[in-house]
Amino acid sequence: METTAAHGVSTSTKHLIALDIDGTLVGRDDKVRGETVRALELVRASGHQVVLATGRSLVGLVSIARRLGLSEGWAVCSNGALTVRLDRAAPSGHEVIECRTFAPGPVVRQAWKLAPGLHVAVEEIGWGWRVSRQFAPGLLNGPQKLTRLDELLAEPASRVVLQAERMTARGEGLHRLGATVTPAGPDWLDVTAPGTSKATALELVRQRLGIPVERTLAVGDGVNDIPMLNWAARGVAMGHAPDAVRAAAAEVTGSISVEGVVPILWSLVPGHALRPDLSPLAAQLFAAVHTAPTRSPGRLVVRVWHGSGPGLAGCAIYVLRGGRWERHAPVPSGTSTTMRDVERAAREAGLAYPRGDEGRRRAHWRTAPIDRPEASAAFELPLTPPERPPLP
């Protein structure tokens, strides 16, 4: 059985969902809304790959990814200059897969002629910024280190920021000097390597994941999102986006003030998982099971693992394919719960599992292979969905 969402997109096939951060997932107040996080968890439980794609530096990406509940998977930052894998087992919580650099000297020197004394910042990957002058608080993610201009230009850079009054209008010809120049407001220019954009980095991720082009979705609100919206099979602009961004998109959703990204994410989730009477854990179990490539008895399990804390360290749905167990989707709300909580949520979602036939008829959990670095023990419980989903 194949579940189809309201938009008409099959939810039994994996999609790559590229999401801008500022203005799409979080507003100017930098607050993460609960409904946005719940939608992200549900779409991940439906087997889709969520890829953050942001103009933020790596430091700014990692901090917000944690708050959004994303500690694993792919991400793109610095407007496509950096492609990373989020990995909770890595010492820094991430691994840089690709870094595109360029020689900043020609662009910065020309910009200095156009706007003497402008603010220049060069990203120090994973730490912060080296700057010619201090930027106002909140404008750059991470700490700043004052550095002489000649030292700023001495080495290849992944991303350079140029800030001065009316810098966007002054720097219209800078791209001819061998760099990608992207405006971010009237006084701000981001400079990266030639041919660099969120789209170029996302295409690398798409190929790594083996997801067809027609199963790509992107949501954004800024000028730097236009290449990404053109790249995606389904490009969606936020309702508050500038005219040029909305014109580049295939569709327009609500603004950030009404969490316009949420209904777009819901469109890739089985409709029954959105029932208001289901708990988040039950909804995610339902979504994961009903989007799995197989739902035959004995070929689908919920696997949990224990770490050093009292609650579960993780929870995911696995399927048996070609004689091997493969992870289909995480169940984010299973983290920090208990195995009994998972059993109750499975019943709530209408999922059957084997039990004993005497006494309290407890669930028959079995020992599972430990395939997570943070796990000290792992268990799995076979699940069987009903032939037809329960009525809403």
Image (tube, rainbow, N blue to C red):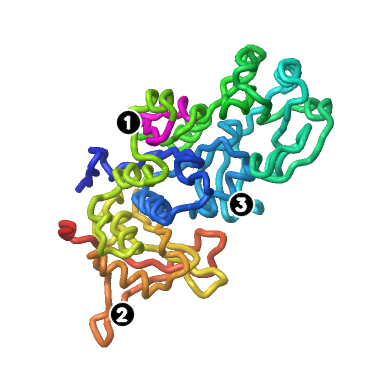
Residue 325 visible in the picture: no
The percent coordinates of residue 315 (x first, y second) are 43, 62
Residue type (three-letter) at the residue carrying disc 1: Glu
Residue 194 visible in the picture: yes
- Asked which quadrant contains residue 105, the reply is top right
| Residue linked to disc 1 | 251
The percent coordinates of residue 207 (x first, y second) are 46, 32
Q: Secondary structure at mark 1?
A: strand
The percent coordinates of residue 256 (x first, y second) are 42, 43
Q: Is residue 318 magenta?
A: no
Q: How many residues crowd mark 2 within 10 Å: few (<14), some (14–19), many (20+)?
A: few
| Residue linked to disc 2 | 362
Precedes in sequence: disc 2 or disc 3: 3
Q: Is residue 233 magenta?
A: yes
Q: Secondary structure at mark 2?
A: loop
For residue 71, above or below residue 220: below
| Residue linked to disc 3 | 93
- Magenta-drawn segment: 225-241
- Asked which quadrant contains residue 260, the reply is top left
